[in-house]
Amino acid sequence: MNLDALRQIQLPHAIQVQRRGVSGTSRLPRPSEALALALGALGTLARSSGVKTINVEVEGQPVALALIEGAQFGEDHNGNTTLRGIFDDNK
């Protein structure tokens, strides 16, 4: 694996969660909430595309990889990360 080819996800907006008890306001998710969102999204993708996971070491550090079968990351015209190949409308 060429580590120089690794890229970070670029999105125009961070996911926001509703503030409990305060109507119309939102906040950034806590780390545990962000983890639940990421795992939930991977689980949802697994229903329509094969999602496999593996634990590896990269430069001596543990890394959890999720492999999404039939998908590729790309960029839109603004440089935001896209995921192509799973659904016909995202190709």
Image (cartoon, helix red, strand yellow):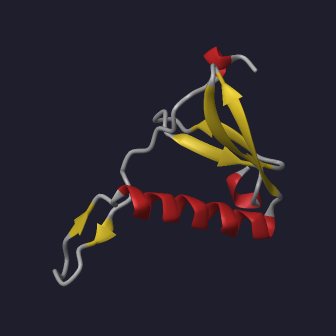
Name the residue nearer the viewer: 14 or 59. 59
User: Toward the viewer: 68 or 33?
Assistant: 33
**Image position of 35 (left or right of 29):** right
- Image quadrant holding the N terminus, namely top right
In the rendering, at what x and y percent does residue 18 appear?
A: 29, 74
Q: Which residue is drawn at 47% across and 38% down?
A: 10
Position in image of residue 67 (x %, y %): 76, 46
Seen in the picture, residue 71 relative to 5 is either above or below; the reply is below
Residue 26 image point, x, y percent: 24, 68
- Give the residue drawn at x 34%, y 61%: 29
**Closer-to-camera residue (53/80):** 53
Q: Is residue 26 above or below residue 2?
A: below
User: In this rendering, would 21 be left or right of 30?
Assistant: left
Image position, residue 77 (x, y; %): 51, 35
Return the residue nearer the eye: 22 or 11: 22
Q: Quadrant of residue 64?
A: top right
Q: Which residue is drawn at 68% across and 66% down?
A: 43
Left-right relation of 73 to 69: left
- Outermost residue to the front: 60
Q: Based on the displayed image, in which of its 4 quarters is residue 24 positioned?
A: bottom left
Please, is residue 46 above or below residue 19 in the view? above
On screen, residue 87 above or below 1: below
Count of labels in the image = 0
Residue at image location 23% in from the left, 74% down from the top: 19
Residue sitting at the far left: 22
Task: Specify the quadrant of the image occupied by residue 57.
Answer: top right
Answer left or right for 19 relative to 84.
left
